[in-house]
Image: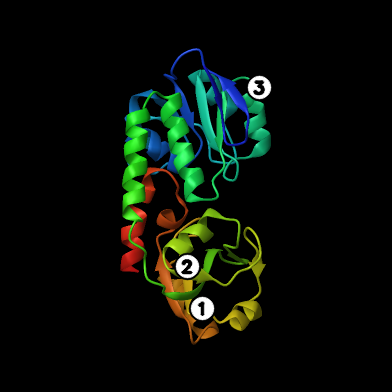
Amino acid sequence: MHFTDQLHQTIFLPQPPKRIISLVPSQTELLVDLGLEGQIVGVTKFCIHPNYLKKSKVIVGGTKNYRFEVIDSLKPDLIIGNKEENDREGIEKLAEKYPVWMSDIFSLEDNYEMIRQVGRITQRESQSQEIIRKIKSTFEQPIPHKGTCIYLVWNEPIMVAGQNTFINVMLEKAGFENLIDKPRYPVLEKEELQMLNPDYLLLSSEPFPFKEKHFEFFRELLTNSQIELVDGELFSWYGSRLIHSAEYFRRL
């Protein structure tokens, strides 16, 4: 069958995939939740959910750098990646040999479509529809407005989540107003942070591992802001992890 991914590229699979490599942690977790753990042969070193998976699967590199000889030895019949998270040159090299299906996620609807398509490719359509139903049900009740915010994804330089990102959509769902009007992930100077003066400064647990030790610096910088360490997975991981996001947002 022919399948079109979210980059409008078409792949052909003569039969349902039996040897899958996932190059995206959140999509690896989705495959497991679809009941496909047995079909997964390779994952990245960042595929930490479920936490035992890396011990039973072959590590094929990271999300940007791939061990091509290891991938070749696994003989995958499907590789699943993501436009933002994966290296374009590496993906194009893999696509010369293997069917590569790519996601491109900017909204919850994009996420639902990704889950539907992965379910269709792997013949797990009923399971994928159930995951979508669960995610939608958790967001049915609106979450009250909390205030303005800035969401940090990196330190030194200070990099923040802006418009046209999945994180921005999740911030809105969580009741925050993102003060960053620039697209993607701009770098801010300390003075810019102070001028914006958000109600909340959200320090994400990933990709930069903000810890309690970083609080003092930002508290001195933003004396009127509430500083919060937040679970980056629940703001940025699409797929089945979103089942847990709305409840977490309500507790914040």
Which of the numbered marks, if any, corresponds to residue 203?
2
Q: Amino acid at mark 3?
A: Glu
Which residue is the site of mark 1?
218
**Earlier-in-chain disc, 2 versus 1:** 2
Question: Residue reaching furthest right?
Answer: 89
Q: Which residue is mark 3?
A: 96
Q: How would you rate the neighbour count of disc 1 (Cα within 10 Å): few for under 14, some for 14-19, many for 20 or more? A: some
| Quarter of the image where one finds residue 195 | bottom right
Alpha carbon of mark 2 to alpha carbon of mark 3: how far? 39 Å
Q: Nearer the viewer, residue 8 or 37?
A: 8
How many neighbours does mark 2 have within 10 angstroms: few (below 14), some (14-19), or many (20 or more)?
Answer: many
Q: Quadrant of residue 157?
A: bottom right
On the image, the x and y values in percent for residue 43 come to 45, 34
Q: Residue flagged by tag 1: what amino acid is it?
A: Phe
Residue 218: x %, y % from top left? 51, 78
Badge 3, how many Cα within 10 Å: few under 14, some, many 20+? few
